[in-house]
Amino acid sequence: MDGSLRVVSFLFLGFLIIASIHPNFFSSGESKVRCIESERQTILMFKQHLRDPLNRLASWVGDENCCEWVGVVCHNVTSHVHQLHLRSFPPPSYDYSTDVDTYDAKIEAYERSKFGDKITPSLLDLKHLNYLDLSYNNFNGTQIPKFLGSMGSLRYLNLSNAGFGGVIPYHLGNLSNLHYLNLEGNGLYVNNLQWLSGLPLLQHLDMSYVNLSMAFDWLQVINKHSSLLELRLSNCTLHYIPSISSVNFSSLAILDLSSNYFENTSIPSWIFGLRNMLSLDLYNNDFQGPIPVDLQNITSIRHLDLSNNQFQQFNSKLVV
């Protein structure tokens, strides 16, 4: 990773950390924006059906200004609720110096800390909500609520590792303003991906660990998204990478197709035409033969992982 990319990465990571720890970072503390009464009531109704074992939403009470509540961000001018940051914490990493019982206790405590139970349609009354993060919670294998597809102002939707299950509702394809969609790490599956065609502004898509084995049209649908910058489809039970005559998502910077064990014996040639690629993960896919020299055409690349394939030799002409 060169210096400029490293600086950008650190700045972006720092921004995410600050935003997740203190969501009202987006608001001016001196503006004293007062929340709209109907939206305050909506948030309180939403809270009634949400399990909160650690009482993290203790500030969500009474007649207080909801724009100052934990996880709630209001617009500085209109006072409308624009963002709900309700993610829980990622699971604790395993430390080999820690005994198993201690680690298991940490996991149990972690599981008990998550939001859960039910997401109610009361959220539909937040007409101006453009950011919703429910990641790392536990909704007990329930289906992603279909009504989320009616929240037309959403630009950012993160449901990753939130314990949803079943088929992904095609209603999400109605979110025509969506720029960011993360469904990674859930017990989810699709019958097809045609609903993605309704998201013309999509820039970041992560469906890693979603079962896409029935989505034979996956690449044709993805190829309609010319604004796509990041695509993560790791561990999706994809069987085959189709060929395409021309790549419409040529601005793609991050591509992760790892751990799918494709029936293809070689890396498809269209990947070599992604000249703006910064990160490429194709590990655990059982590709064979020599590493294609055409990879040197992607001169922008900074991260490349081709491990755990069946490449027979390293091509000395390959420069990354």
Image: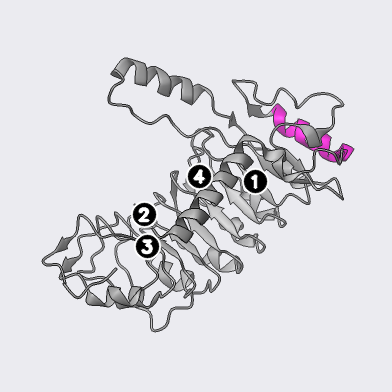
* Side of 274 relative to 88 (left or right): left
Task: Give 146 or 183, whichever is nearer the viewer.
Answer: 183
Local packing at callout 1 (Cα closer than 10 Å; few below 14, some 14-19, many 20+) is some
Q: Which mark is residue 132?
A: 1
Q: Give the quadrant of residue 190.
A: bottom left
Label 3 vs 2, first from the N-terminus: 2
Q: Which mark is residue 234?
A: 2
Task: Give 194 or 102, whichever is nearer the viewer.
Answer: 102
Q: Amino acid at mark 1?
A: Leu
Residue 276: x and y in percent read: 44, 72
Please say if the residues under marks 3 and 1 sit with CB atoms less than 8 Å apart: no
Q: Amino acid at mark 2?
A: Ser
Q: SS class of the residue under badge 4?
A: loop
Name the residue rendered at 61%, 40% in the picture.
18
Local packing at callout 4 (Cα closer than 10 Å; few below 14, some 14-19, many 20+) is many
User: For the magenta stretch, what is the residue range?
Assistant: 33-48
